[in-house]
Amino acid sequence: MRKYAIGAVVSGALALSALAVPSASAATPDLTFSNVVVNNGKAIVVGTAATVNVPVKYTLVRPADLVLDGLANDAGIALYRGPSLAKLQNEMESDEAAKCTTTATTATTVIASCTEVISIAPQDYFFDAADAGTWKVAAFYGRSTSSTDDDGNHISFNFGYDMWGLPGTAQVKRAAKLTTNATPEPVKKGSTLTVKGTLTRADWATTRYAGYTGQPVALQFKAKGATAYKTVKTVTSGTAGALTTTVKASADGTYRYTFAGTTTTGTATATGDYVDVK
């Protein structure tokens, strides 16, 4: 189990690199990170309670004589929020060492394909709405040594950490939820059907879902026996995320609301409500 998160203790000027990690000190090996893909290129959507496991894959080139055991020596990918590493506001890393498979070697280097998983518990990383949006990608190298001397009643720990910015970003979004309720049921053909619902999204400050107002939400209908939904109209969410509209009941089928999401909020589709038209 590892935990190298740098948090608020970043100090000094850390070298930035497009693809490679240059030596920052005599104790830092030459490492190159490339081809970083976070969450398979998709947005990371996080609610208020459930842990979200985010896969990360990349190519790592390391010195042939460097053993990355996840303890004394470790390297991997981190996601961070802030204008720069020196002004880092929050950071996420995997708690487990990366799994790397050697793909090629030279006399002095090993090239490996690596994967790891960043497990995101929302209460550990997200505290307000500002935490949604674009997170940046970084690479890190951590090293530690320790010794104990029972005879002298002495212990010592030495820890070093280097971090470098890399190209690429990851989009973090607040999870959204939708409901749909069509009434009356059953309904006479040609009569007015009222379709209500609610659009909410994760509020990390309160660890609850709150109404999302002023958002376009599509009302869709799938006739009995059909295989696909068709959009009937677009409704704007009101106070507390409330949705309401009316349609003419023409045939048996299922109504549902669906939300396309925003740059900071994920998509959502309500469970359909089947209506029997008499």
Image (spheres, rainbow, N blue to C red):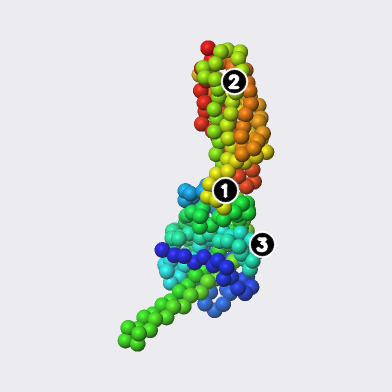
Circle 3 sits in a helix, a strand or a loop, which is it?
A: loop
What residue do we see at 43% from left, 72% from top?
A: 72
Spatial CA distance of label 3 from label 2 is 50 Å
Indicate which label's residue lies in the foreground, 3 or 2.
Answer: 2
Among the 4 quarters of the image, the one containing residue 138? bottom right
- Label 3 belongs to which residue? 83
The residue tagged 1 is 203
Q: Is residue 70 above or below residue 259?
A: below
- At label 2, which amino acid type do we have? Leu
Label 1 element class: strand
Q: Earlier in the sequence, mark 1 or mark 2?
A: 2
Q: Is residue 206 left or right of residue 72?
A: right
Quadrant of the image containing the N terminus: bottom left
Q: Which residue is mark 2?
A: 193
* Separation (CA) of disc 1 from disc 3: 24 Å
What amino acid does circle 3 point to?
A: Pro
